[in-house]
Amino acid sequence: MRSLGLDVLFKGKNFLRLLGGLWVAVRISLISVVISIALGLVMGMLMTGKNRVLKAVFRVYLEIVRIMPQMVLLFVVYFGTTRVFGWDLSPEASAIAVFSFWGTAEMGDLVRGALIGIPRIQYESAEALGMTTAQVYLQVILPQAVRRLIPLSINLITRMIKTTSLVMMIGMVEVLKVAQQIIEANRKASPNAAFGLFAVVLLMYFAICWPISRLASYLEKRWA
Amino acid sequence: MDFEAIRSYLPLYWDALGLTVRIGWQGVALALALGVLCAVTLHLRLPVLRRLVAGYIELFRNTPLLVQLFFLYFALPKIGLRMSPAVCGVLGLGLLCGAYMAETIRSGLESIPPIQTESAQSLGMTRMQVFCHVILPQAVSRSVPGLVANVIFLLKETSVFSTVSLMDLMFTAKDLIGMYAKTMECLTLLVVFYLIMLLPVSVLGSLLERRLRHAEFGP
């Protein structure tokens, strides 16, 4: 196995550097997921409301997110908006902005679905008891909706983590970029390192995403 | 906006769109074929194959396409498997989305109540007939919304092909920005061309969904 790059993997601090790169990816996705969940809850509630204009705006927003590849959004934010508005965005800030923009739409749609799934009678009974709209949502509807939402939002986390592999395209050094750097640095000594390193990166992503998606499907079955 | 520049870039973008669509649809075809095969394997509980298929689905659903493509394009040649960028693209897309398709079709198959199988059997149909004439048609029509979502997802994912030097839309935009630094024009064209590619798919998809729901539940 010497020739396939496993020696390079444990040379010096290489493995730690890879883990560091992985942490960058996980950090970005966790921050984006937290923002998406918060904004998505609000958006989902507004989408089930009665305001027509707001609904239309959200429909267009959802459709944009559904159609535009995240990579295009990253380019537009990182290269486009910095050019047009002249501000200075770090790659990390652009990535978080794009992933939150995307995640909010996804989450909003999930929340809408979960809220619609709650029978009307729940709303009506709560109102008949004299609860205000805020009380109805906070104490009756949301606690029931959250149960259906948790598995779905856990799935969103794995999708975020997988999508963060794109941030190397706007110049962030995450795990895939680190692997490339290590391969370049050892081009002479270990020309076949690409195999070992990319295989390890693939397995690293799998090792993170697989348990999370197992947890999601377990919860989904259990709470269904 | 420099419209002169936009006009001169247009042919390049149309070429790139052609390539993206071509590879995209080959990927979709491969993914659908793989998805149906895998879903049927899981549904019929074929002994050893079932394990293999489940492993494949988990592996490809839980890793990003970008990393899979890097593995196919940069790592496999080191053990003697060399493929052209286009083959890598189709294979990567097909394998990734095949896993998603399989999951969608499998849940469609599982949603058909057992009484359908039992009734068909009591009419004297063979196991194969039951599957092909009763279960599969219903399962396909139930899976359509998921399948359409998968196709859109797959066509979106083509944007990572630029990393294995396929001249797709993303590659063209990056290349032109690098050469002429007309960032605004190139990015606007990029967005417009992705809309041209995906908006029809999205609209057709929802029409198809409505039609099928009509077929299932009546007017």
Image (cartoon, coloured by chain):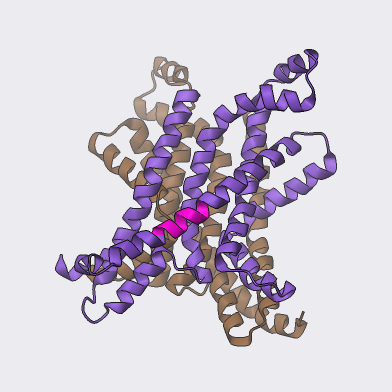
- Does B53 sit left or right of A101 as displayed? left
Above or below, comparing residue B43 to residue B36 in the picture: above
Count the marks.
Answer: 0
Residue A4 picture location, percent across and down: 20, 68
x, y percent for residue A162: 46, 54
Q: Residue at x 21, y 65 (%)?
A: A6
Magenta part, dominant SS: helix
In the picture, which quadrant includes the N terminus of chain A?
A: bottom left
* x and y percentages locating residue A34 in the rendered image: 57, 46
Whether residue B208 is visible here, answered yes or no, is no
* Left-right relation of A93 to A203: right
**Residue A191 picture location, percent across and down:** 24, 77
Residue A32, relative to residue A2: is it above or below? above
In the image shown, does B42 or A79 lie closer to the viewer?
A: A79
Q: Which residues are magenta?
A: A22-29
- Which chain is purple in the rendering? A
B171 is within the stretch colored magenta: no
Left or right: where A43 falls relative to A25: right
Q: Nearer the viewer, residue B124 or A28?
A: A28
Hey, which quadrant is residue A84 in on the image?
bottom right
Q: Which chain is brown?
A: B
Q: Residue at x 72, y 16 (%)?
A: A121
Residue A25 visible, this angle: yes
Q: Residue at x 71, y 80 (%)?
A: B6
At a point 64% along the width and 79% down the height, the residue shown is: B11
